[in-house]
Image: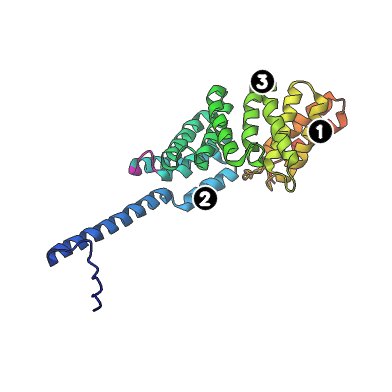
């Protein structure tokens, strides 16, 4: 005689219909609650200013109307802080944009708290090792360097370099930006020996790379050239400046009024690069070439008609 198949018994058997309905209601409530929570989180991450307002601020910035762009963003930030709280993730895009605008106006003291708050929000929501958190630390550090707060900037930049080395490797082109930041930090302090270590390492990584050169390679050459110029090593500085100019001229926006995109160089910064190179050429007795570079610098700053 074949025994009957065992009947599957549910792990829980309600004792009555009312109990069953109660359990189903609880499950539905849990599902709906989770859905609402997730929806709220997504809304908080993407909420804030209508895209048209952000775009208007960017357009004004491109026209170099920085005060007008800031005037649009400040009340919007205040409203979000009032209605959503001072740590709402939707503030990030506003903080970042306003901090960039203040930086363009050389208002680094006003930009600093924005970069700090943006970093703290990312730290809280994304974690200490997230690329966006590391990137926020880099931007804060550059703002601190602009104010001469080198001791505050150094640990942020060292952490960034350590993170990228651990992720990409010590010889990867992806760490060149962090090496450049470290070189700039010491160069600003006229600590040429320390700056040379990082700038030379970045240049060697760039030279070893095949194919399309990363934009950071031109920055590395420029920084190493500045280190040599600071030590009056004109013959060593000249070819590096020449390479940086040839690379950077390809990375200019279409007009001086247009802010550079990531990887590009502003016309003002390019003009400064040309002037720095002209100084080195003049020191080397190459007056004609120096004047040509100074003319190129003036042309780069010529406003649109």
Question: Element type at marker 1?
Answer: helix
Q: Mark 2 or mark 1: which comes first in sequence?
A: 2
Magenta-drawn stretch contains 85: yes
- Residue 200 picture location, percent across and down: 72, 30
Residue identified by numbered label 1: 239
Q: Is residue 35 above or below residue 176?
A: below
Question: Element type at marker 3?
Answer: loop
Q: Mark 3 or mark 2: which comes first in sequence?
A: 2
Closest to the observer: 273 or 24? 24
Is 12 on the left-hand or right-hand side of 267? left
Closest to the observer: 240 or 155? 155
Name which residue lies at 52% across and 34% down.
137
Closest to the observer: 94 or 238? 238
How far apart are labels 3 and 1 at the CA level? Answer: 22 Å
Residue identified by numbered label 2: 55
Is 122 on the left-hand or right-hand side of 153? left
Q: Are marks 2 and 1 in contact (CB under 8 Å)?
A: no
Q: Mark 3 or mark 1: which comes first in sequence?
A: 3
- Residue 115 visible to an observer of this rendering: yes
Magenta-drawn stretch contains 56: no
Is 247 on the left-hand or right-hand side of 43? right
């Amino acid at each position: 005689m074949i025994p009957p198949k065992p009947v599957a018994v549910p792990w829980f058997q309600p004792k009555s219909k009312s109990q069953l309905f109660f359990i189903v209601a609880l499950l539905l409530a849990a599902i709906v609650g989770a859905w609402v929570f997730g929806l709220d989180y997504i809304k908080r991450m993407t909420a804030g200013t209508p895209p048209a307002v952000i775009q208007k601020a960017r357009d004004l910035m491109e026209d170099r109307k920085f005060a007008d762009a800031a005037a649009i963003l400040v009340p919007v930030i205040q409203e979000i802080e009032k209605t959503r709280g001072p740590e709402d993730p939707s503030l990030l895009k506003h903080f970042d944009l306003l901090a960039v605008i203040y930086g363009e106006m050389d208002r680094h003291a006003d930009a600093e708290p924005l970069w700090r708050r943006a970093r703290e929000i990312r730290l809280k929501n994304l974690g200490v090792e997230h690329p966006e958190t590391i990137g926020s630390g880099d931007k804060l550090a550059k703002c601190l360097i602009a104010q001469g707060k080198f001791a505050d900037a150094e640990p942020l930049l060292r952490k960034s370099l350590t993170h990228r080395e651990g992720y990409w490797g010590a010889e990867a082109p992806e760490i060149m930006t962090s090496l450049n930041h470290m070189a700039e930090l010491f160069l600003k302090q006229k600590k040429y020996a320390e700056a040379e270590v990082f700038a030379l390492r970045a240049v060697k990584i760039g030279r070893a790379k095949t194919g399309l050169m990363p934009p950071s390679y031109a920055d590395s050459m420029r920084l190493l050239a500045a280190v040599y110029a600071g030590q009056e090593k004109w013959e060593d500085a000249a070819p590096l400046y020449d390479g940086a100019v040839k690379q950077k001229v390809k990375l200019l926006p279409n007009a001086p009024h247009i802010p550079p995109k990531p990887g590009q160089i502003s016309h003002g910064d390019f003009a400064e690069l040309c002037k720095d190179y002209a100084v080195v050429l003049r020191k080397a007795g190459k007056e004609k070439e120096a004047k040509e570079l100074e003319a190129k610098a003036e042309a780069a700053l010529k406003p649109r008609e």
